Amino acid sequence: MNINKIWHEQPIKNKFMLISMLIVTCSLFFVSTAFFVNEFIDLRNAYKKELLTISKTISNSVVSSLVFNDKKTAEKIVSNLSSLEQIIGIAIYDSNNRLFAMYKRKNGDVKFDPKFEKKLGFNFLLKSVELSESIFFEGQSIGFIYIKSDLSRFYIRIKTLILTIMSVIILSIIFSYVLLNKLQPLIINPIDRLANLMDLISRQRDYTKRAEITTKDEIGYLAMVFNEMLDTIQHHSLELERYRKHLEELVKKRTEELMEKNKELMNELKERKKLEEQLVQSQKMEAIGTLAGGVAHDFNNLLTVVLGYGELLKQKVKNDGALSRYVEHIIVSAEKGKRLTEGLLAFSRKQMSIPRPINLNEVVKDTQKILKRLIGEDIELNTTLCDKDIIVLADYVQIEQILINLVTNARDAMPKGGEIKIETSLFYMDEGFISRYGYGEKGYYGVFKVEDTGVGMEKRVMERIFEPFFTTKEVGKGTGLGLSVVYGIVKQNKGFISVESEPNKGSVFTVLLPIFESDVSVKEEEEKVVKIPLEYGKGETILIAEDDDSLRSLIKIVLEQFNYKVIEAINGRDAIELFKEKKDVINLVILDVIMPKANGKEVYDTIKEIRPNIPAIFISGYTSDFLSSRDIAIEHLEFIQKPILPTDLVKKVKKVLEKQ
Ligand code: ADP
Ligand code: MG
């Protein structure tokens, strides 16, 4: 630690005190020294004077003794000096420098030496003073006197003097210290206050505070300048604060904007993800549909064959109890299978449909009875119908089926009862909706909602409900085809279906079907919408004449399945009569060659007279050779050999009808 550092670290007060005290001490020192020197010289002079006075007195007294050479008197005079304690010794010399008289204080340290003493004058030594002076008589030196005196009295005086001066100095210093201490606040306090204020301001950053100006000196000036500075700082700080606030607001606004954008982006991402999912889902459904449709189609044909031969077999084994029971089982199972494949066909949109303008409100109204029977008593069914007619172009039966399937599911979801709400409404699908949900086409839609208060679904179930054979119901209870059929029908009619559900919070199924614009002709739409598989008919009427009941009913089943209307005749005459009766609606006749009452050929010839170009197909268990031999030529006629394969039958029917 050096002094410089210590000095710098001291508060002003200490520095002030130190400097002041230093000045006071120095001043006192110089004053005292001067005083002391002055006193010292004075004292010395006083000694000299005293010695001179003594020497004069003695000189005057011994003049006569010298003149008269009276040593005794001189000795007496000199010895009188013993009364003066300070005199160490005294010697009187005559004109020849011979000792004339002398006095020596007891154990006084003095050696008289006239050679030395004569020239001496006044001599101030450390412990003593000496004086030698000539003695005059009538202007002539008649000898000289030498006096030596000690300085003990002088030193006592000096000591006292020093003590006094020291006391005065100490007292002065103490007094100065006290006084300075009392007075320093006058100078230091304003500085202190200023410093404290600065400190406070710098810590609290409160620029509204101001220094108090108490003096008109430099400190006052400093306070004034400081206040001015504070004004500027306050001004700047206010401005800064304003800027800061402005900036903060800007940042806040920007952040909000960013958040907003971010949210939008997230939403967009979410939407995009949803759309992607929907796309994947619809592609999946499409693929499943194609697959299911293909399988179902082939399977349906196979089942028709099974059913066909099953029917034949049933007739054949009528008398055998056990066998006919087996056959019955086969037929029942095949029929179940057929219903399944029909569902699949509906899903893959290969099911036949006859779209015509229908009012959704009416379908709901008309179906209510069936629905009520379906759901039982502990479930309430409430319908709210749109006050406007909602005309859509669809197959009545299909819409009914949608309702039935949805309501059946709702019922199954509420084993402990609940409420089903059916609601119809009109809806305009705008671009906003399309971009939001990622599907649809602009325009008006008829809507029906089926809402239940049942068990609801988890998301992972909801994702799969439209898949064929997806079911959460126990084996035997659900086929998993209900919603697939609904989906197929909705798609076939260019509609949309959506579902909202949460576990234990019920489900809402919403079906949207495009509103039928009346300026589009029904026919056109029909042709556009309906994709009828090759083998299917267009609802033509066919007269079958066959005496074998089971074969006839098989043919009827097969044909009806392929969308033909069938009139059955049990023998030749019956056929002719029925034809006459309905000659205008019949498009084709199927005739067994060998029949009672009138054979096929005869029937054909007769009806040909009524309608010359009526197409006909002959069926027979006999070969054409056999028939020719019986004079029944069929070369130019369409012929199917028994046993009839249903596929062959429908193909042949289609071919013949298309020829027309
Ligand atoms: P199924 O009824 O034969 O199971 P669906 O295709 O009709 O087949 O339905 C498929 C699945 O969708 C059902 O098993 C069920 O899990 C679910 N589901 C359909 N509708 C509802 C509903 N309203 N509430 C709860 N779950 C339903
Ligand atoms: Mg179902």
Image: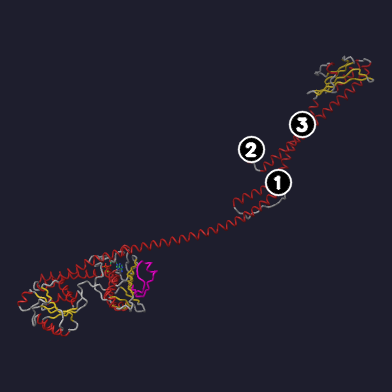
Tell whether 126 sits left or right of 654.
right
Q: Which residue is mark 1?
A: 187
Q: Which residue lies under the disc numbered 2?
A: 4
| Labelled disc at residue 71 | none
**Local secondary structure at mark 2:** helix
Per the image, label 3 sits on a secondary structure element best described as: helix
User: Callout 3, which amino acid?
Assistant: Ile
Q: Is disc 3 surrounded by few (<14), some (14 to 19) or many (20+) residues within 10 Å?
A: some
| Residue 110 image-quadrant placement | top right
Q: Is residue 419 visible?
A: no
Mark 3 / mark 1, whichever is N-terminal = 3
Q: Quadrant of the C terminus?
A: bottom left
* Element carrying mark 1: helix
Q: Is residue 447 magenta?
A: yes
- What mark, if any, has residue 162 been given in the picture? 3
Q: CA distance from mark 3 to mark 1?
A: 35 Å
Q: CA distance from mark 3 to mark 2?
A: 35 Å
Image height of 94 relative to 645, above or below? above
Q: Tell me how far mark 1 sits from mark 2, CA to CA.
A: 24 Å
The first of marks 3 and 2 along the sequence is: 2
**Marks 3 & 1, CB-CB < 8 Å contact:** no
Report the amino acid beneath label 2. Answer: Asn
Camera-near label (3 vs 2) is 2
Q: Quadrant of ligand 1?
A: bottom left
Badge 1 density bin: few <14, some 14–19, many ≥20, Cα 10 Å: some
